[in-house]
Image: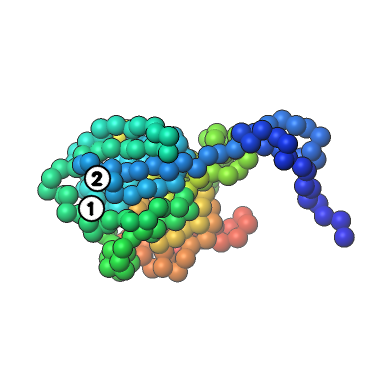
């Protein structure tokens, strides 16, 4: 049986580069994407260590604090420093004293893997899968949604360089314009980065939506709702829990059902 696929030997290549695509005759390098531990520190205390792509870390910190419900708005978060160490990165921020008790509720005691949304959460009560806020649903006409889906690949610069390894999360405004794109090895991280960037850049969220290259899971929905965005589109399917939560929250949610076909689930 003849396969359409091909494996070529890349063991003698520089690990900072990778073997090429295609038939192996072209040796153009592909950039390998790093995963780096980043310690998120609030008021001098480490709250979580997440595996991230090492860029847009200020956006990540703000988005994480907001999407996790640690802070209600960016004014409660004072970014202090992003430091590179021998082990990774340390991202430091101070929170207003009146919200410091929220850190214990969402405390994470384990390393957060890049593909994991709940790593290190200490109790089932902290997950709160039956509690979600409400958003004003975005009006997302078919032409705007499909236009944004078609336009996204051209803005995934890091993903093209890295051979398709990175997730992308974009904020699309009510007119269908992709305003911000963030990429990361972890889909939750990519979402946190774009949510943080939206807030830091003062982008109007009204009528807009999040567009993600990943599947739609429980925490993708909760993070989107927590940050007050009324629409969500994913390029892979949703879980049953995600659909139920989106309907409960009033979130407009459109997900890919199969090749070439998207379905509005909420």
Q: Nearer the viewer, mark 2 or mark 1?
A: 2
Q: Position of residue 37 (x, y in %)?
A: 43, 43
Q: Which of disc 1 and disc 2 is earlier in sequence?
A: 2
Answer with the quarter of the image where residue 250 lies. bottom left
Q: Residue at x 21, y 48 (%)?
A: 72
Secondary element type, mark 2: strand
**Quarter of the rendering containing residue 261:** bottom right
- Answer with the quarter of the image where residue 225 lies: bottom left
Q: Residue at x 32, y 43 (%)?
A: 40
Tag on residue 140? Answer: none
Give percent across and percent down for residue 233.
46, 52
Residue denoted by label 1: 103
The residue labelled by disc 2 is: 45
In this view, the residue in front, 254 or 123, is 123
Tell me the crowding category of disc 1: few under 14, some 14 to 19, or many 20 or more residues within 10 angstroms, Cα based. some
Q: Is residue 29 above or below residue 134?
A: above
| Residue situated in front as seen by the camera: 3 or 224 | 3
Left or right: where does residue 27 sit relative to residue 125? Answer: right
Q: Residue at (71%, 30%) from the top-left corner? A: 28
Q: Are marks 2 and 1 in contact (CB under 8 Å)?
A: yes
Tell me the quarter of the image containing the N terminus: bottom right
């Amino acid at each position: 049986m003849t396969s359409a696929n091909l494996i070529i030997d890349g063991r003698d290549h520089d690990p900072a580069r990778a073997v090429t695509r295609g038939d192996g005759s072209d040796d153009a390098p592909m950039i390998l994407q790093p995963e780096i531990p980043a310690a998120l520190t609030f008021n001098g205390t480490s709250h979580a260590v997440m595996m991230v792509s090492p860029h847009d870390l200020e956006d990540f910190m703000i988005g994480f604090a907001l999407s996790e419900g640690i802070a209600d708005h960016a004014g409660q978060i004072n970014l202090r420093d992003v430091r590179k160490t021998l082990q990774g990165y340390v991202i430091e921020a101070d929170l207003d004293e009146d919200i410091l008790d929220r850190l214990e509720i969402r405390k994470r005691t384990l390393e957060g893997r890049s593909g994991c949304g709940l790593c290190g959460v200490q109790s089932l009560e902290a997950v709160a899968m039956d509690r979600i806020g409400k958003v004003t649903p975005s009006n997302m006409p078919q032409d705007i949604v499909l236009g944004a889906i078609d336009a996204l690949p051209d803005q995934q610069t890091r993903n093209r360089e890295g051979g398709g390894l990175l997730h992308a999360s974009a904020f699309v405004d009510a007119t269908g314009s992709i305003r911000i794109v963030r990429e990361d090895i972890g889909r939750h991280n990519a979402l946190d980065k774009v949510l943080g960037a939206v807030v830091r850049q003062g982008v109007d969220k009204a009528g807009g939506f999040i567009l993600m290259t990943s599947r739609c899971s429980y925490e993708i929905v909760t993070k989107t709702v927590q940050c007050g965005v009324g629409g969500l589109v994913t390029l892979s399917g949703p879980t049953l829990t995600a659909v139920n939560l989106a309907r409960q929250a009033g979130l407009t949610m459109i997900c890919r059902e199969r090749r070439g076909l998207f379905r509005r689930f909420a």
